[in-house]
Amino acid sequence: MPEAQTESQLVVSAPAMEPSVSHELAQKRSEAKTQFAPLPTSALQSTVIREEQPAEVAAAASTDEQPSVSAAPTTAAGAAETSARVFHSQADTFVAHAERQTMTAMQITSMLGMHRIHANANAPIPRLADHDVLIEVYAAGINPIDWKMLDGDLPVVRGSLLPFTLGFDVAGVVSRVGPRASRFKIGDEVLARCDRPGTFAQYCATHEDTVALKPNNLTFESAAAVPLAALTAYQCLVDVAQVTAGQRVLIHAGLGGVGSFAIQIAKTIGCFVATTCSARNMHAAKALGADIVVDYRSQRFRDHLNQFDVVIDSLGGKCLTDSMKCLKPDGLVIEIGGLPTRTILRSLGLRGYHGPREMSLLTASRYSHWKCREAAKKHNVRYEYYFMHPSGEQLQRITRWLADRTIQPVVDRMFEFFHVEDALNYSATGHVSGKIVLQVKSAPSPPARLNSLPPASERLV
């Protein structure tokens, strides 16, 4: 395999699956349908106590939908008692959180030095827009975009934004809802790829359209490993490539976060799947459903793989151009690594590329994408650069597969909440099989070296 691939490939093996588990996955996929009916509104809509409503008003509005509560008494005292009982039975956590104004967040405090992330016990709890939900974070997923932002590879964090909270993937419990949010209620167990960074904290906010209900068979830690990686795989295969049963798909880094989901989703759709990984991970890749597994260290994949309809590449460089030689005429290679465009940064809720270094990175990004398009023309294939977008509807479809165990997340390692920097450093090695997860809700007190920051009003500007 080309040297450009070696540093990014996955070489630490994920927990091997038993043959029975692999057989069960294959059986489930054979029964799964590639098209899903629209989600019933009854499954997502429920009685909601909104953030700005008095308790009595919210309780009275929801009485008709609460079968466990008897009809409202005719007396004013009885009505007030029933309203209070309904409110407290549904929203004890709302009362507690409404009184709380601050939280602990693991924030970037400096872009230089050894320890750049510290625990801030005085971070403000996010304020909600009309259609937002506030999620109490039980677990958060680590993604390459997080350490790239920390290291400056994605120039979106500047001194004026510090302290800054990273993180996009979350699994937790809804603790508040915005005035017009209607899809979720307080107490719902959910997962989301948030529309803004901030999940490395006790609470995070996101638009309700990015959220999905968590399957009962998944722990919060397993659920936190799903959103960004699974949505990327799903959107590449279903939205961009529009693959159908019988097509041939090559997925590089098959034991990566995206790769492990892409293999399973492609097999669920009915595709023939090939992947690349290290020799020690070949058994795990087979267990996920790959039909052909190539050891990138001892073999050149382009010598063994050809006539593919779609390639999903997260490695870039020579691996990307070599992948074009494996495609049929008019085949499609989708790049999901590299530098995003200015438009993609804005879709993340971030604004970057301001200084000379940032502008040079933008120029390099444009040149790289142009070079790939020209190479694709030369090989008579198509090239697309893709960055996922959050979608609660699509995430809910993915959770159906998770609920019946048609697909499953692969978790490499879990870190305690206050060891975010260690988790990011491990992710940056490129030696990760599956996903890395932060345990937030069960985290102990912060270590002594992670000193809490004083309130903003007491900090020097």
Image (tube, helix red, strand yellow):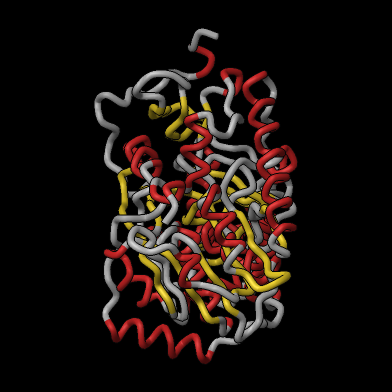
The image shows residue 168 at horizontal and vertical percentages of: 54, 47
Does residue 235 appear in this view? yes
Q: What is the count of numbered marks?
A: 0
The image shows residue 175 at horizontal and vertical percentages of: 53, 51
Horizontal side of residue 356 vs 67, given as left or right:
right
Which residue is rendered at x = 67% and y = 19% of the image? Answer: 355
Q: Quadrant of the N terminus?
A: bottom left
- Would you identify the image quadrant in which residue 40 lies? bottom right
Relative height, residue 207 to residue 121 (above, below): below
The front one of 241 and 42 is 241
Q: Quadrant of the C terminus?
A: top right
Does residue 81 appear in this view? no
Relative height, residue 40 to residue 234 (above, below): below
Relative height, residue 323 to residue 130 (above, below): below
- Would you identify the image quadrant in which residue 114 lies? top left
Horizontal side of residue 190 vs 436, given as left or right:
right
The front one of 458 and 164 is 164
Q: Residue furthest top?
A: 460
- Would you identify the image quadrant in which residue 293 lies? bottom left
Relative height, residue 346 to residue 10 (above, below): above
The image shows residue 304 at horizontal and vertical percentages of: 46, 72
